[in-house]
Image (tube, rainbow, N blue to C red):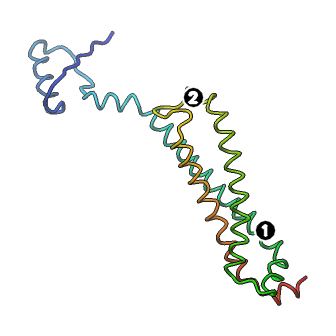
Amino acid sequence: SRMRLFVRTRVDPAALASAVSGEIRSLDPNLPLSEVKTMDERVGDAMWRTRVGAWLLSAFAALALALTAIGIFGVMAQTVVQRTSEIGIRMALGAQRRDVLRLVLGSAARVTSAGLVVGVVVALAVTRVVASLLYDVQPHDPTTFGLVAALLGCVALLACYIPARRATRVDAVVALRSE
């Protein structure tokens, strides 16, 4: 029902389109011409669903990363509140602010590391299921796994940093008095 003409050229295809249209009209002026496009435009039109899907997936991934950071921040803030008296005792016994910071960030790093190890193991197992959906990425690509783990680790530690800094400001006298 439709006829398509493809022209290969070494010059700019957009500049050649009007010349090809003019030549076709000179052969048959009654022949309707529509959708005169370059191959790049046709490929772009064919790929719009894929691009929208990739953009939506990226947006949801960014949202999930933000929610993860907020959740980690909340858990660490609650942990610091629960450990206020312990931190106050440590400060009263001579612990420096950097020691308290190291204590809180160290415990966060241990939990984050354990979570990353479990996450990588689960992701390696799940790649068999999603291998058919991957484009231009190998299912067990170590670079991708490493970069994602590093990104998630950095986000987790940054989310823990504010509660850890708050822990360094605990006044030992106030913390012990509230107990």
In this rendering, the answer to whether 88 lies above or below 142 is below
Is disc 2 placed on a helix, strand or loop?
helix
Residue 43, label in figure: none
Quarter of the image for residue 41 reads top left
Residue behind mark 1: 78
100 left or right of 45 in image? right
Residue flagged by tag 1: what amino acid is it? Gln
| Residue 109 vertical placement versus 65 (above, below) | below
Q: Where's residue 147, x and y in %?
A: 53, 49
Find residue 128 and report its horizontal and vertical position in percent: 62, 28
Mark 2 touching mark 1, by CB under 8 A? no
Q: Is residue 134 left or right of residue 28?
A: right
**Which quadrant of the rendered structure holds the N terminus?**
top left
Image quadrant in which the C terminus is located: bottom right
Residue at (80, 81) in percent of width and height: 90
Q: Is residue 43 left or right of residue 134?
A: left
Looking at the image, tell me whether mark 2 or mark 1 is earlier in sequence order: 1
- The extreme right residue here reads 179
Which numbered dot is residue 131? 2
